[in-house]
Structure formats: structure tokens, C-alpha cells
Image (cartoon, grey):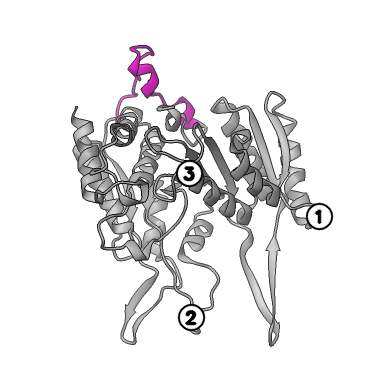
Amino acid sequence: MLSRLGLGLLARAAVAGGEGLAARAFGTGSAYLPLPGDARSQIVTLIPGDGIGPEVTKAVVDVVAAMQAPITWERFDYLSGSEETAAGSVPRTSVPKEVLDSIRRNGVCLKGTLFTPLNKENTNTQSLNVQLRKDLDLHVNVVHGFSIPGLPTRYNNLDIVVIRENTEGEYSGLEHEVVEGVVESLKVITYEKSLRTAQYAFEFAYLNHRKKVSAIHKANIMKLGDGMFLKACREVARNFPNIKYEEVIVDNTCMQLVNKPHQFDVMVTPNLYGNLVSNVVAGLCGGFGVVPGGNIGDGVAVFEQGARHVAKDLAGAGVANPTATLLSTAMLLRHLKLAGFADRLEAAVLKVYTDGDEAALTPDVGGSGTLLRFTEAVVRNLQE
């Protein structure tokens, strides 16, 4: 269980090394053999974002510094869903070029959620989060929901990965008012993007020793759009005969998740369904504060909490849970082939839960502590 995040996100992460927590706990497994230069400092773009983002990313920066991991942050603290102008605060309508250039140059980013308010002057359906994914072609979103030992939830031993197409579908942003009072929104599904999402899902399952891939759809109603998504999934499934493949209608999926969630392993979905399903999975595993995730493109990766909640109501209160962002950072470290640091970080975070000290746990998981107390507990665990 403790080594689950060690499985990694990308195909290359599966062979990047790292002995894993479970192996090390029992004194087994071979040492990770780095290549010359693997200990060099690597630059990571950091976007703290809005809401609780600046607080939880600060926890990450403090913990990474305590680990002495070879990470240098290229920060964009100013980037927010709003920007200040002479007329006051207005919604930001695009991701600055210097931010996109930084992520492309560094190849990896850690971000908090960006909040884009909508009003009469800004009816753009594309939030900054969506624009960032499209600008960088981060075509796959991966959310890993699993039961954390020491965190009571309705179900134990959950381990579900949601792999979501990340750039089209209902998020295409193509909508207009046909006549007054009538709005037309277009859902765009392409075979090419469906195919690469399905390919990633099956490769993930294969490389991480997973047994089943479930394609989530509504093809009984959207026969052409979701039917094309299923066609792509079926084509890829034929190339992985040792992985069980099934198709589940999205409304039934939601019912099955809250009733019998253990039947799911890897789920592959179009864009909107993945957003819904990953939030259900996060709720089953303890909430948006504990589930990690990442967005993957060709040569670039952006890591963030799996359930994207800006949590503006918690901003500044000092009680936000940094677990999801810290575990997403463990994913990031494995992506950078820093498996030993990733293992240490993951173990230190999970130990806060198994220790069960309510004073160190945040209120969303039944504790009485603060973000600072949680972070301090992680740092102490790293030093043991």
C-alpha cells in the first residue's frame, strides 16, 4: 500500500528506479543506480495559484527544502485568475506567454488551482486551468485515489486510477446563443485524441501491473461522440489481451462507485465524465485534500491536487490540507527520476496519518491541527 504512488505516472517513470517503500521496509530490493548527473539541481515551474494554493505550495517548498532535494523553483506568484488594472480587479483571460515558456523549457510544473471568475464582462468558458492544458496539450489527466491507512472512510483498501481525456469534449469551449434564451454548446470528440487517451490508459495499466481498464461512456445516448471514444478504446484493448476491458455507462458508474467501488481499477474517460468520476473517487478516499494528480503531455507534465478545488473559503485560515499537493509532489519527483526523495516524502506524509495525532491533522480529516502543524509533522518524519 505504501509504495502505491511509487508506480509512477509515465511509462518512463516505471523504469526510472527507486526501491519502493514496501521493499525497503523489509530490507529487500536492489538499490537505485543513478546515471551520472542525476543529482544535479532541476528547475521546476511553480504556480501557487488562488485560494489555498499559495499556502499548500508553500508547505511543499518548505518540505522539499527540508529534504534537500535537488529542486530549484521558478516561481510565478503573480499568476491568478484575476489581475489588477486601472479599472480594478478583472478576470484574466489568458495564461501569460512567459509562464507557458517556462513550463515548456523546464518540462515540469507544480501548480495550485487557478480561479477564473465569470461575469457579464467575461463570459469566456475557458478557465485558466483549461487554457493551460490546451496551450501545452496536456492531453491526459491522471487522478490516483487510494485509501490512506489511519484515515477513516466509508470503504477501506480502495485503489482507483482515473485517466481522463483532458482537452476536448464539453470543455471545447464552443458555445453560443443561437437566439435569445437558446444556447448551443458543442461537445467535440475526435478519434485521434480518444485513441491517445486509451493508449495511455492501457500502457499505464500494463506498466503498473493493473488488471482491468473500465471505459466510462454515455454511448447509449450520444452514439456518435461517445461511440467514437469507445471505438478507440476497443482498438487499443485488442493489443493488451492480458488486461480485462469493460465498458460502463457513466450514470451506472457513479452508482457503482458509491456502492461497490472495489470493482474498479483503472478508469478511462472522456473529459467531463472524468471530472465527475474523479471527484467521486476523491470523496470516497477522504476528500479533495488528500488525492494527488497530474496532467501529462508530450515532453511536459503539470502536477496538482487530483480534485481541483480552489477552496477560497479556506484561504488564509491556515487549516488547508496539503496532503494532495505533497503527494502530487512525490509523483513529480518520480517523474524527475528522484525516486529516493519521492519515497521519503510519501512515507513521511502517510506516517502523519498512521501516527494518528489529531493535533497534527487538519479539520477536513477529523483533526484539530493546522496546515503548519501538519507540515511540521512531515518534516519531523523526514528527519527520523
* Distance CA(mark 2)–CA(mark 3): 35 Å
Q: Quadrant of residue 67?
A: top left
Q: Which mark is residue 119?
A: 2
Up-down: is 168 above or below 205? below
Which sits earlier in the primary sequence, circle 1 or circle 3?
A: 1
Label 1 sits on residue: 223
Most common secondary structure along the magenta stretch? loop
- Helix, strand or loop status at disc 3: loop
Up-down: is 3 above or below 92? above
Q: Which mark is residue 251?
A: none
* Distance CA(mark 1)–CA(mark 3): 34 Å
Q: Residues within 10 Å of mark 3 (few under 14, many from 20)?
A: few
- Whether tag 1 and tag 2 are in contact, CB under 8 A, the answer is no
Q: Which residues are magenta?
A: 12-38
Q: Which mark is residue 299?
A: 3
- Whether tag 1 and tag 3 are in contact, CB under 8 A, the answer is no
Up-down: is 202 above or below 231? above
Which sits earlier in the primary sequence, circle 2 or circle 3?
A: 2
Q: Kindly identify the residue that appears in the image at 62 percent across and 36 percent down.
A: 264
Query: At which x and y percent is residue 279?
Result: 52, 51
Q: Amino acid at mark 1?
A: Lys
- Helix, strand or loop status at disc 1: loop
Q: Amino acid at mark 2?
A: Asn
* Distance CA(mark 1)–CA(mark 2): 34 Å
Q: Nearer the viewer, residue 79 or 180?
A: 180
Tell how many labels: 3
Query: At which x and y percent is residue 271?
Result: 61, 54
Please state if 175 lies on the left or on the right of 332 as rendered: right
- Whether tag 2 and tag 3 are in contact, CB under 8 A, the answer is no
Which sits earlier in the primary sequence, circle 1 or circle 2?
A: 2
